[in-house]
Amino acid sequence: MEKIYYSEIGESIYFGRLKNGLPVFVYPKPGFLKAYACFATKYGGADRRFSVGGALTDTPEGVAHFLEHKMFDTEDGHALEELSASGASPNAFTSSDMTAYHFECAENFIENLERLLSFVSVPYFTPESVEKEKGIIGQEIAMTQDEPEYAVYYSFMKLLYRTHPARESVVGTEESIAQITPETLYACHGIFYTPANMALVCAGACDPEAVFAAAERLLGALPAGESPVRDYGDTEPLAPERLETRIKMAVSEPMYVFGCALPMGTDCGARPEFTPAGSAYLKYRTAAQMALSYLAGSSSPLFHRLYAEGKIKMNFTAEFEAVTTCRYAAFSGTSGDAAEVMAAVREETARVLREGIDAELFSRIKKKTLGAAVRAFDSPENTAVEYCSALFKGYDLFTAAEVQSSVCAGDITAFLEELSRGKWVVSVVEGG
């Protein structure tokens, strides 16, 4: 494996690529007692329509999440139980654009890594187990639909986007998962769970050469596969059909999400390669996060004023989100008048654009952002997962600080100008 040293942050990572193209990264942390592994695929809930070799495939909502659940099944038992019995703490998650399988352990790391690589790369489904899983996930769907946080967020997403799959839940619906068959799962595994679409990252108390050797033993003979071409539909108009939705639920105080869609970006592609597009995305995302912190973050003048007036609580947040090709700004909170808070945020956006960026506040927010990014490397578990996510978005997590440092006040202004031109929507859940 090749050792790469990053002088800017004083960290090293080891990189190797199997003959079939699978990238393997190892981030050793001397002095740590535990090791972490993350084996991930660039396949999430939004990847419902895709093509390989020109053949277009449409799948129901929820397949990626369903597949994540079923991958722990093996012909001889259940991988979750085997990993736990060997001292590991395993888990998995599915987001809109990624599925990751990960574990941590203080001993038997290579043995547990081999178990992880084996069950993720060798699917095993039966009609009976798939039908049983539909009942389990159906209960999960029913529970989430009763959660106000779920309702307010997805109502907001449905206001922002008319057709983009990011507007739908990763879990799917009871109707959509009823359409899933073992054949559906095998087909999607064969397309997305390939070296062309995956990455392995390990961190903590682990030996790079031992990790690479284990990956070569378990995965080296797999065919490389072909990167699927994703289809998220036509570019969404930035003008929503409706501006507001209100839902009655059993809540003690109203909760809301408001914000606007931003110009859509481009997906950075399936292969985990570092690209100029990936670095550009990282810089845009960092500028967006800084801009929202400047505008309405917990240290902003607006936040302090609205809090002092009792119009927001400490749980008020301002976030930038990017899912595949869609980007949006979301402000969320509880209690108070959502329309009044939204108007205040929009007025503050106009004021900042009119009066300009305060150099001292910008400097403070930038230092806080960069400091948080560097401190994140103290967590090998977080680093392993975030490194996979960064790979799939086309940028090197270990050079992120360099890209983030290049964000200037002009980038903040440019983002706020986008925000000012947006068509804002608000989703509210209230008692009744």
Image (cartoon, grey):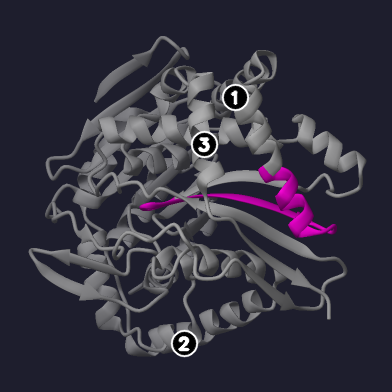
> Quick one: label 3 or label 1, which is nearer the N terminus?
1
* Image quadrant in which the C terminus is located: bottom right
Residue extent of the magenta highlight: 323-346
In screen coordinates, is 367 left or right of 113? Answer: right
Residue hosting label 1:
375
> Quick one: label 1 or label 2, which is nearer the N terminus?
2
Q: Residue furthest right?
A: 309
Q: Circle 3 sits in a helix, a strand or a loop, which is it?
A: helix
Q: Where is residue 315 in the image (x, y as percent from the top left)?
A: 78, 48
**In the foreground, 59 or 416:** 416
**On screen, 417 above or below 311?**
above
Q: Circle 1 sits in a helix, a strand or a loop, which is it?
A: helix
Identify the disc placed on residue 1. Answer: none
For label 2, the crowd category at 10 Å Cα-Cα, with few meaning under 14, some 14 to 19 and many 20 or more, is few
Numbered disc in front, either 1 or 2: 1
Q: At label 2, which amino acid type do we have? A: Lys
Q: At label 3, which amino acid type do we have? A: Glu
Q: Residue furthest left?
A: 53
Residue hosting label 3:
417
Numbered disc in front, either 3 or 2: 3
In screen coordinates, is 283 left or right of 307? Answer: left
* Image quadrant in which the N terminus is located: top left
For label 1, the crowd category at 10 Å Cα-Cα, with few meaning under 14, some 14 to 19 and many 20 or more, is few
**On screen, 83 above or below 364?**
below
Q: Quarter-wise, where is residue 298 in the image?
A: top right
| Labels 3 and 2 touching (C-beta < 8 A) | no
Residue sitting at x 38%, y 42%: 388
Q: Where is residue 378 in the image (x, y as percent from the top left)?
A: 57, 26
